[in-house]
Image (cartoon, rainbow, N blue to C red):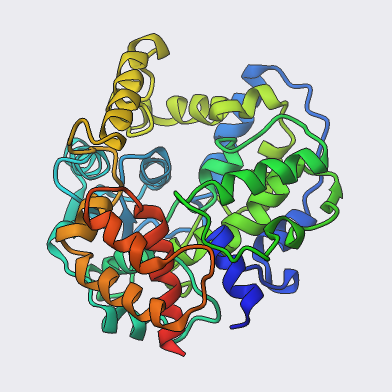
Amino acid sequence: MNRTEINTFLAYGFNFGSLANNTNYKILKEIKIKDNTNNIEELLNSGISLFKSLFTKYGKSDNYVIPMSGGLDSRTLQIGLLSHGVPRENILNITFGSPGNLDYEIGKGLSRKTQVKNKCINLSKINLSFSDMVKSAENHTFPISFIDNYYNRLILNYNTEKVKTLVGYMGDPIAGSHSIEKLTWEDSINIFFRKHIDYTEVRLFNSNFRPREILPKKPLLGNNINYYDQLDFILRQEYFVKPIVLIDEEIYDSPFLNKDWIEFFLSLDSFYRRNRFLFKKILEKVDGTIFNYYSEENYGFPTNYPEIMVFPSKLKRKLLKVLKSKGLLNYNNIFENYIDMEEHIRSGALRGLVCDAITSLHSRNLIDRVDVMELYNKHLNGYDYTKSLIRLTNLEIFLSSR
């Protein structure tokens, strides 16, 4: 791994591969954007029919595993299978995270409400070792989010018969959760660039590296598809998200990776994709009882709860985050997807892993902008460098696997 590749990972959290092997690029190349003048009822009917068609390839008598979270995409998969006629007893939902957190409790609660079997994995009880993580990285060409990947891979322990596992990969960006109004290519690049390099608490890439310069100089697919969607789908989703959630392509599948489904949503007016407006309407029509169950993205309220009712919880969460960041308050963040990584680096399931990784990385003298050991020690003493330390740990896991 050369210095440019190392710095690219430190800046973006992933490395760029060849477009010739990029699944999302190949799909998007075949997309034909259509002028869509249908009214809302016509769009709903078309969307419902198209949604149900996504699941016709799955056998009604087969067994399925769904990683069930507190988000919308995983429940959408269950709705799709049930509406197709798959019996409830043929579905196993697997929920993983920390008891008390929304992602964990909502996934578990939805399974109970819909009478679907559920297995729960308490990640806070699982200590990750550096040697095990290094071994898991040996077959990877570039570093990925190995910790996230490891947690998702635990699902395989409950799927010994290797039945089909459905994941919601690409579901929310296709529907419009990341959609940005039409911008110039330059503006889209700027937003994509800032979003990624501002993610970590401090800059990790070397001072002479210019991360913006490695981004594409011109649109990857002309002006046929929203410029920001091109960057998100082809770069971030393919190289960052996909390795985390599509664990074993032999048994894993995402129904949303369907040309007709993608074409339908990318042809919509921005109003219908904004905040997944039409997607939500479609799923409410197919099965509003399941879809409108409590959701993490709606701060623990039902999916169809009005914004005015949710706003106080949004405000409270922001206030708590500010107070915690200033050391004025310590609280359990129920919005964490896996575990409270900030605290687990200090004294929990991640302490040994991060300590070993940072110690090893420090000895390499690869990074000139920050002292990684000092960063780690500051974190132990109450500062929050969680995102930076996790990225550095993922890098060292890969480097040690070579």
Residue 85 visible from this viewpoint = yes
* Name of the residue lying farthest toward the top: 308
* Name of the residue lying farthest toward the bottom: 402
Residue 334 in percent (x, y) is at: 23, 37
Label count reads 0
**Going 65% across and 65% down the picture, which residue do you hit?**
23
Q: Quadrant of residue 355?
A: bottom left
**Going 34% across and 63% down the picture, which residue do you hit?**
374
The one of 38 and 5 positioned closer to us in this rendering = 5
Where 37 sits versus 79, above or below?
above
Residue 340 in percent (x, y) is at: 24, 49
Residue 251 visible from this viewpoint = no
**Is residue 221 toward the left or the right of residue 211 in the image?**
right
**Going 57% across and 73% down the picture, which residue do you hit?**
6
Where 350 sits versus 330, above or below?
below
The one of 245 and 137 positioned closer to us in this rendering = 137
Where 203 sits versus 83, above or below?
below
Residue 265 in percent (x, y) is at: 66, 37
Residue 8 in percent (x, y) is at: 61, 66
**Is residue 323 toward the left or the right of residue 45 in the image?**
left
The one of 326 and 279 positioned closer to us in this rendering = 326
Q: Quadrant of the N terminus?
A: bottom right
The one of 133 and 260 positioned closer to us in this rendering = 133
Q: Quadrant of residue 307?
A: top left
